[in-house]
Amino acid sequence: MKSYPDIIPVFPLSGVIYFPKTNLPLNIFEQRYINLVNDAYNKDKLMGMVQLKNENNSVYKIGCLGKISDYQKSKDGRILVNLTGLTRFEILDEVVNNKLYREFKVNYKIFEEDLSKKEIKIESSNLMEKTKVFFNRNGLLLNWKEFEKLNQIQKINTLAMISPITTEEKQKLLETISLKEKATTLENIINFYLHEVNFNNQTVQ
């Protein structure tokens, strides 16, 4: 299994959660994060993303390590990057530094499946059919023909990332250990929303 650094720069961001084997475009304009991206790009192109909590500038314990796969500077000083998700990590502790951005000591061990080269196959046909109904009811368009070209891990992680569900539900999906658990959790979440719609906002006694 490939090893990654124990201490990484982390971009805490509210409302943005991404997963391994997905892509996340970022428009960087704050100086502290411009510094972060430049330092990461000049070192090993690795940086973490984690969900920011509402209180005390704290963060969730589980995030995703990404590699900068595209980097462009705009004329007005912004940096446009694309992050390709590699593996999730668990935050162990924050590292005190003299930089504008935050760094954390992390561990990847519980998410070894993210880095496995073995092809993981699970039964997900029900999930895919329900997702199509769910997206359609929410007016979301997805190029399903292109989507079918993805492997199963990419499909489930992409759906977990873009589904019209709450940030808390996406964080829950990010924290699931195995792909099977993630697919089951996502299907349960979608079932809940489809069930609610079927009752047409009526209260069930």
Image (cartoon, grey):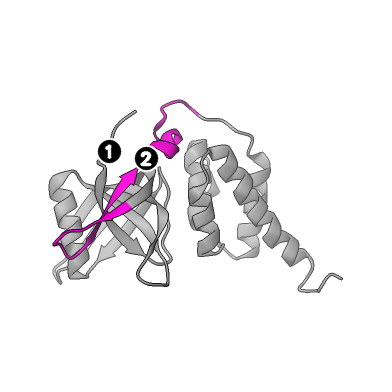
Position of 140 with respect to 117 (left or right) is: right
Q: Position of residue 81 (x, y in %)?
A: 25, 56
Locate residue 58 relative to residue 80 in the image: left or right. Answer: right
Q: Quadrant of the N terminus?
A: top left
Instruction: Report the front residue among 1 and 133.
Output: 1
Q: Which residues are magenta?
A: 93-119
Looking at the rendered structure, the kind of residue marked 1 is: Tyr
* Mark identifier at residue 4: 1
Residue at 53%, 46% in the rendered image = 176
SS for callout 1: loop
160 is within the stretch colored magenta = no
Q: Find residue 108 and name its label.
A: 2
Check whether the beta carbons of the residues at disc 1 and disc 2 lie within 8 A of each other. yes
The residue drawn where x is 27% and y is 38% is 4
Front-most of residues 157 and 149: 157
11, 59: nearer the viewer? 59
